[in-house]
Amino acid sequence: MEQIFPGVVRLTFGTPETDTPSRQIYVKPPRAEALAALPPAEFPFGAESIRFRTAARGCRLELPLTPAEDVYGLGLNLKRLRHTGKKRTLRVNSDPATDTGDSHAPCPVYFSTAGYGVLVDTARYASFYCGGNELLNAEAKQETDGKIRLTEAELYAAGARSSAPMVIDIPAARGVDLYLFAGPTLLDAVRRYVLYSGGGALPPEWGLGCHYRACGTFNEEQVLALARELREKHIPCDILGLEPGWHTHAYSCSFVWSKERFPEPEKLLQELQENHFRVNLWEHAFTHPEAPFHGELKPYSGDFKVWNGLVPDFTLGEARKAFGEYHAEQLTRRGVSSFKLDECDNSDFISTPWSFPECSEFPSGHDGETMHSMFGCLYMEVIDRACREAGIRTCGLVRCAHAFAAPQPFVLYSDLYDHAEFIRGVTTCGFSGLLWTPEFRHATSPEDYIRRLQAMVLSPAMLLNIWMMPNPPWRQLVRERNVENEFYPPEEQERLETLTREALELRMRFLPYLYAAFAAYHFEGTPPCRALAMDFPEDKRLREVDYAWLAGERLLVVPFRAGMSELTMPLPPGVWCDFRTGERHSGEVTLKPELGELPILVRENSVIPLADPVEFVENGMQYQLTLRVYGSAPEPARLFADDGWSFDYEDAAVPAWGTVDADGTLSAGLGKRYSVKAVERL
Amino acid sequence: MEQIFPGVVRLTFGTPETDTPSRQIYVKPPRAEALAALPPAEFPFGAESIRFRTAARGCRLELPLTPAEDVYGLGLNLKRLRHTGKKRTLRVNSDPATDTGDSHAPCPVYFSTAGYGVLVDTARYASFYCGGNELLNAEAKQETDGKIRLTEAELYAAGARSSAPMVIDIPAARGVDLYLFAGPTLLDAVRRYVLYSGGGALPPEWGLGCHYRACGTFNEEQVLALARELREKHIPCDILGLEPGWHTHAYSCSFVWSKERFPEPEKLLQELQENHFRVNLWEHAFTHPEAPFHGELKPYSGDFKVWNGLVPDFTLGEARKAFGEYHAEQLTRRGVSSFKLDECDNSDFISTPWSFPECSEFPSGHDGETMHSMFGCLYMEVIDRACREAGIRTCGLVRCAHAFAAPQPFVLYSDLYDHAEFIRGVTTCGFSGLLWTPEFRHATSPEDYIRRLQAMVLSPAMLLNIWMMPNPPWRQLVRERNVENEFYPPEEQERLETLTREALELRMRFLPYLYAAFAAYHFEGTPPCRALAMDFPEDKRLREVDYAWLAGERLLVVPFRAGMSELTMPLPPGVWCDFRTGERHSGEVTLKPELGELPILVRENSVIPLADPVEFVENGMQYQLTLRVYGSAPEPARLFADDGWSFDYEDAAVPAWGTVDADGTLSAGLGKRYSVKAVERL
C-alpha cells in the first residue's frame, strides 16, 4: 500500500499489464497541492482485506462492501445511476441499449457512499459485480423467503441486502494496480480522483456558450446564411458546427475541404470569426485514402480498416504526428477552434456493425479491446494538442472517454436519445470525471423541444445539433417538413423562437456562475454537475435521484420532460429557495413549472450572479451582473476571472478566484471581468 | 487437417484448452455409419487459408468467406436468423434483449450457404465477426459512396457486401480445435454436425404430446383437480408439470416435497400415472441447505453461491453422483418422468442479477465462463442419467444448451415472450442441433392466445405453461382476473376451450409424422424444424425468412401472430399445396387464415399421415391413420415404429423405419403401431 499523495494510495497485485490507462500519453500530472489541501481521511479498509487471484482467463479482485454502502461511478451510464447489487461490464459501445454497463465512456472507477473510491487501472472490458454475489463460505445473508411466486417480477425481485463483496473480473490481465481514494466524504473521494487525474477541464468561456450545428448538406453559402440568421434573430451562439459535408469524403474521412461545397474555406472561417463564431468541425479518426497523410499513417495503423479507413495507433508518436500535424497545419492554424470527435467508441452490434474488432492488433502491441477503451482519450489528446499548437484553448465534443479523462476539454454525447436517459447521463458522469451534454437533436413536440433545451441550461454544454435539418428547429420541428421548407404558421414560429431565445439566454445568464463551477472542477476537483447522492450520501432518499442534479455550489436543477406536469421530490438537508420566486422549501418540494420555466432551486443564503445575456462571448469581456440574493445570511459567490480565453490560467501563480458579496462588492481582481449593475433580494 | 469421419475434419491450432465442449462427459459417440452414408463432399477451403494467431487476450482465427455466402447458426437466436455482416458474441444470458449473440443457448458452430459448417471447440464467450470487418491489406471492397446523410439510419446502412473474412475472437485460449463439416449442401453439413454430435434426440412419443404446467401455488388436491378437469374436458395432455411449489424451499431448491402442499407425493404420482399423465418437476441446480445431499455436494461446488444455494461442479463425478443419485432414488424411481431445468443459463444484467460470475472458480479447475457455457449440457446429462437409471426415456425442458447438445432429450424455452421472436427461435435452432419451444404462457387477447397455441403445433414441444394462473387459460386469459376466479361468459369460455382443443388435437394428429421427423433427426441428423434457407440455400429470397419453417420432410408451416390478417411470402422451388384445401401454389403464396386455422403447406406429391387424436399416448399403442394425399405422384410417407416408449430403439440392429403408400399399404413392421382407416386425396 503505497501512499502516492495524501489520501491516494496505490496497490499492485500480480504483474500488471503495460497497456493500461495510467501509462498513456494523455495522463496529466496530478494536482498535488490541491490534493494536499483536502481534509485528511482514513481508508475504510486495508490492503489485507482485498483478495486477488489469477486464472487462465484473467484476474479477479474481491474488495469489501458493507450492506449499508451504495456504489456509483463506472463511467457514463444512461441506464442506471446506482450500481449496488448489479453487474456492470465496461464494454465500450455506442449502443448501450440495455442496463449492462455498456457505454460510450465506461470508466473502471467506482465510489461508495462510505466515502472512498477505487480506480482499477485497466483498459480491459472488466466486469464489476457490485455486491450481488455471495461467496460459498459467506454466512447466508442472501436467503430468500422460499415463498412461491406467480410472476417473473416477483421471482427475481431483490431479497435482503447481502454482505457480498465487490468482485472485479479483469480479462487477460495477470495483475493490476488499484488506486484507492480516501474521503472523508464521497465528494472528497471524487475530488481526489479528479485531482489525481490532473484536475477537471476548464473550457474557454465560449466553450460554455451556445453551440449550433448546421445541416450536414450545407455548403459555404448556406452556412453563412445560417450564421446571419442567428445574429439577426439574436439567438445566442458561440460555436457553429459543420457536419461531415465539409470533407471531400466522409465515412471514412479525408480531412480535406470539399471543393464542391466549400470552395473558399479560409474566407468562410474569416467571416465566421469576424462575426464571433468559433468553428467546430465534425470528424472521426478513420482515415480515408484521400487524406493527404494516409500514406504516412498507414504503417502506424491497426490491422483492420473501418469504412475503408485506417485506424490510427494513437499510442505511437508517428501516428499522433501524422494526424496531429496535419490538423494543426491545415485546420487549427487556419481558424478552426474545435472538433466533434465522432465514432471513436465502438459499434459492433447494430444492424450494420462498424469499428475495429477487439481482437485487432496495433503496431504498438495494443489490441483492439484496450484500444477501444482508450481510443477516445488518445484522440482527444491528439486534437487538443493540434489546438494548443495553434494557441487555441479548445472545447470540443467526443463520443468516447475513459479513466483520466477529466482534464480533457471535451464533452460526451450520444445518438441514443431518450430524454430521461439524457438527463440521467448528467447525474452519472460526475462520478467519473466526465462531462456529458443532453444535446438537442430533434423533438416530437414543441413541449419536448423546449424541455430538451431547458435540460441543457445548467449542463456541461448547450448544444443544438441540427445536422438533420436545413432550417432552425423553431421554424419546423418535423424533419420531413423542415427539409421541404414547410414551416409552422408565423405566430407559432415566433412563439418557439422566443422560447428558444429565452432558454439560450438563460444559459448565457449563468455563464459566470458556470465558469466558476468549471474552475472549481479544474482547481479543486469538484464536478460542475453532481448527483444529489454525491454531496449528500447519508440521505438514502436521494440515492436514486437520477432526474435532478447539483450545478455548481449553490443550485439544484430539476429539468422537466415532455408529458410531466408536476413532480414531488425529496430535497437535500437545509432550506432550498425557488430560483424565481424565492419561495422556501425543505424536506421535499412539489414543482409545477410552466412550459417556459426550468425548475431551479437555490441553497438558502446564496448570492447567484446572473449576467446580462450576450449573444456571444468575447476575449476578456466584462459581464454585467445582477445578483440574486436568497436568505438572510448570504454567503458571497465565488467567481473566476482569468481572461476566459487563453492558457494563462494554467501557469498563473495563484488562481484568479474572487468573490462577490450580497451588497455587490467585488473582491480585488474581479473588476476587469465583472461589474455589478443590480442586486435583487428574493 | 485430420479426417476423423467422412466429410468431418479436425484442425488444431496452437494449444487448445482442456475445458472445451468436446471433452465433456455429455458428448456422445458420433453416428459413424450415418456419417459414412452421406454423399461425398469437398471442403470449400483448405487449412492453409485459415489464419491463426495468439495474443495476451486470447487467440484469433480468420476463415475465408466469399461475398455470396450467408452465415447461419451460432445457437438459439431470438433476434436474428442470418448473421452475415454481424458480430455475435456467444455470451450465455437469459435476457438477450438486443441483437448481440447473447442467448440461452449460444453454440460456437456456424454454417454457410456455400455448404459447409465450422465448429469451434470452445466454451469461451467467443465473438464471431461474420464478414463485416475488412483487414488492413484487403482490397477496398467496403468503400462507401461518400454521400452526406441526414439520418442515422442512412448513415449506418449497409454498403456493398465486402469480402471480409469470418474473424473469430476467442478469449483466454492459447489454441483451439476446429471441426469442419462438409456438405455438399448446407443441410448435409448440418446433418454431419448433428451426427457427429451423436445424432438428434428422439423423445418418447409422450414427449411430443401436450404439456400443461400447473399453477405454482397448487397443492396436491389442486393438481389432481386440474388433471381431472383436463380429462373431463378432453383436452389432450401427456405431461403435467409442477412448478417450484413442490419443493420445501425454492430459489434455491431443496428437492424435497413440501409437506404442506404435497403431503402424499407417492399417491399423487400414482394417481396421475393411472390417468396417463407423465409428471414433470421444475427445478434448478442451485442446491439449498435443506437439500439432503447439500453436505455431500458442498466440496464439489463453485466458490460463489446463488440464492444461497450451491452451484454443483457437474464436471466432477462426485457432484454428478450426489445430485444424480438423489434424483434417481427420490424422484425418477418413484414415478417422476421428466424435469424442467430452469435458471441454468445466466442472468447477470437484470434488475436483480443472479447466477455465478464468469470469474467463479470450480474445484475441477473450470471457471465460471466455461461453466456457464456448458452448465445446461452438464445438467441435462445428470438428469437424463437419473431418468435412465429408473428406466425412463425422458423428454424435458432446459434453459441452456451449447455444442454437442443434439442428443439430449430436452427442449429450450425462455421467459422472453415476443411472439415473432419465439417463432424465429424455431428457425434458428435447427442450425445448431437444438430444440426450442415457442411455449404459451399468457396472452394479450384471445387471438394472441390461439395464434400462440398454433405456432407450437409443428414445433418441438406443445407447452401450455400456466404457472402464473390457477385456472385454465380458456376460462380467463387476464392473469389478475384468473387469479380471482373471474371468468369469461360461458359462451366465450366454450369458444376458447373448443379452439384450444382443436389446436391441441391438431398437434396429436401430427404425432406419427412428427415422431418420424425426430427419428430422422436421431438417425440421419436432419433437424425436425428447419429454416427455409437450410433446405434451399440457393434461393436468396428465402435467406431471411424467419417466420416460417419446414417441419419434417414434407410440411412448411407459417404460424400467424395476433394482428396479422394476410401474408404474402416466397415459396421454395416446386409446387406447394394448401394443407386443408389442396390448392396449389408456386413462387409465392398469399395466406389469409381464419382465427382457427394454422397455415400449413405441403410439398406436392406427399402422403401426410394424420392420426385420430388421442388425449394421451400409451406405451406401444396403435395409431389410427387417415392419409392425406397431395399431388398425382405421391411419394410414400416414412413412419417410425419402435414402441415409442423404451430405449429399445437405441440398441436395435436396424432402425424401425417403414413407409405408408398413398393407397394405404403399410410396409412390414408398421402394423403393430399404425393402422390406415382412410385415404383422402386433395
Image (cartoon, coloured by chain):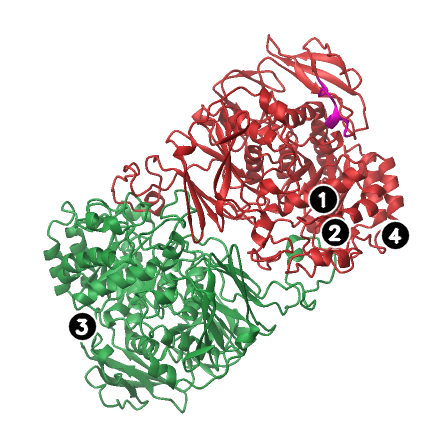
Chain colours: A red, B green
Pair 1/4: label in front: 1
Task: Locate the C terminus of chain A by quadrant.
Answer: top right
Disc 2 packing (10 Å; few <14; some 14–19; many ≥20): many
Element class at badge 2: helix
Pair 2/3: label in front: 2
Mark 4–mark 2 Cα distance, whole angstroms, equals: 15 Å
Is tag 1's residue or tag 2's residue first in the polypeptide sequence? Answer: 2
The answer to whether residue B388 is above or below residue A243 is below
Element class at badge 1: helix
Residue at coordinates 77% horizontally, 59% vertically from top-left?
A295
Mark 3–mark 4 Cα distance, whole angstroms, equals: 84 Å
Which residue carries the number 4 mark? A263
What is the magenta range? A647-657
Answer yes or no: are tags 1 and 2 on the same subunit.
Answer: yes
Asked whether A649 falls inside the magenta stretch, the response is: yes
Q: Chain of mark 3?
A: B
Which residue carries the number 1 mark? A382
Which residue carries the number 2 mark? A244
**Numbered badge on residue B293:** none
Residue at coordinates 41% horizontally, 47% vertically from top-left?
B348
Q: Position of residue B162 (x, y in %)?
A: 64, 68
Which residue carries the number 3 mark? B618
